Image (cartoon, rainbow, N blue to C red):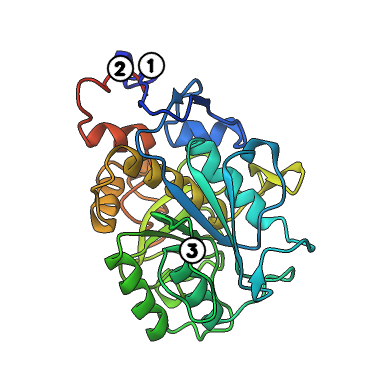
Amino acid sequence: MNRLGAWVMGLTLLAGAGVWSVNRTESDWVLRRIDEPAELRFTVAHPVTVAVVDTGILPQAALDGRRQSGYDFAAGSAHTPHLINPHGTAVAGVVHSVNPGAKILDVRLSDTAGQTTLRKAIDALRWAAGLEVAGVQSNPFPARVINASFTLKSVPHTGCAPTMQSAVNEILAHGTVIVVAAGNTNAPAWQNTPGGCRGVITVAATDDQDHRAPYSDWGAAVALSAPGGTVAEGVDVWWGKHLSERRGSSYAAPLVAGAASLLLAQHPELNPAEVRGILQRSARPFAQGGCDPQHRAGCGAGVLDVAAALRSTELPPVLAGTY
């Protein structure tokens, strides 16, 4: 039995949209590490849209009825058929594996080579949150959670670019949570944009033993960590139309984005700072007292614990039962 005992034996979150079972997109070890019960079934009281600002999302059966078309900032137009890098598809699948009730907004930012610009990134994030962007039609599906599994390589690694920080401040004030991958260069995450921006939830990657993955960026900018896999044990994701074993903080961040969307599904009144605080306070301590015993820098508050995060919000008795 899951460590939450009888409390986690059958929680149904009421809504009119139906009941979903967890999609096993993620390898079992990942969902075990974040305390995701294997038989989770729920409906969503307040369906939440999670924007995946990435390389675009290819058709995936698990996302049928969940994916919402957004805007293609790589091409500068509404979505049109073209070759899409599978990275965004994998990230969307990870979000869905944590919260299959979430709507997934496809916001394509980078081209097939993973290239983009600071200006496009700012516009994509603002548009995903429902803010106005010059020359682009309004977003009909504003997101309460944005997953940004990217680091802008074209921006100097001297901290969050000021224009990005201004955009982040505006998005947070609008009520949208921003979850960001820490980066994969074994360096301080504060140097990155948007990972080093204040107010975002920057996520480092851990292995199957809750240690920092050797490639993962780290430091004071990191809010918490989540499984990202290693060469020895990767994360199973949908890579286009096929399962593939991958690794990176890119796949740790959407686990946290999915958890944030679950919190907001039950408590839509939460603001981004409150969501961040809940996820940090409920995080599981790292193995051996730290994410990297040989490393002086940290990896945030601990490892994502989805069940503990939901439990910490003290759901009303009518919803208590199982998670």
Label 2 close to label 3 by CB (< 8 Å): no
Q: Which amino acid is tagged 2? A: Gly
As drawn, is 151 to the left or to the right of 281?
right
SS of the residue at dot 1?
Answer: loop
Q: Quadrant of residue 241?
A: top right
Query: What residue is pinned by disc 2?
Result: 321
Mark 3 Cα-neighbour bin, 10 Å: few <14, some 14–19, many ≥20: some
For the C terminus, give its image quadrant: top left
Q: Which residue is mark 1?
A: 10
Checking the image for residue 139, the label placed there is: 3
Mark 3: amino acid: Asn
How many marks are shown on the rendered structure?
3
Dot 1 crowding, Cα within 10 Å, few <14, some 14–19, many 20+: some
Query: Does the residue at mark 2 contact the one at mark 1 (Cβ under 8 Å)?
Result: yes
Q: Secondary structure at mark 2?
A: loop
Nearer to us of marks 3 and 1 is: 3
Using the rendered image of the protein, determine whether residue 93 is visible from the camera's viewpoint. Answer: yes
Which residue corresponds to the image point at 63% horizontal and 56% vertical from the top-left? Answer: 88
Tell me if 174 is positioned left or right of 180 in this view. Answer: left
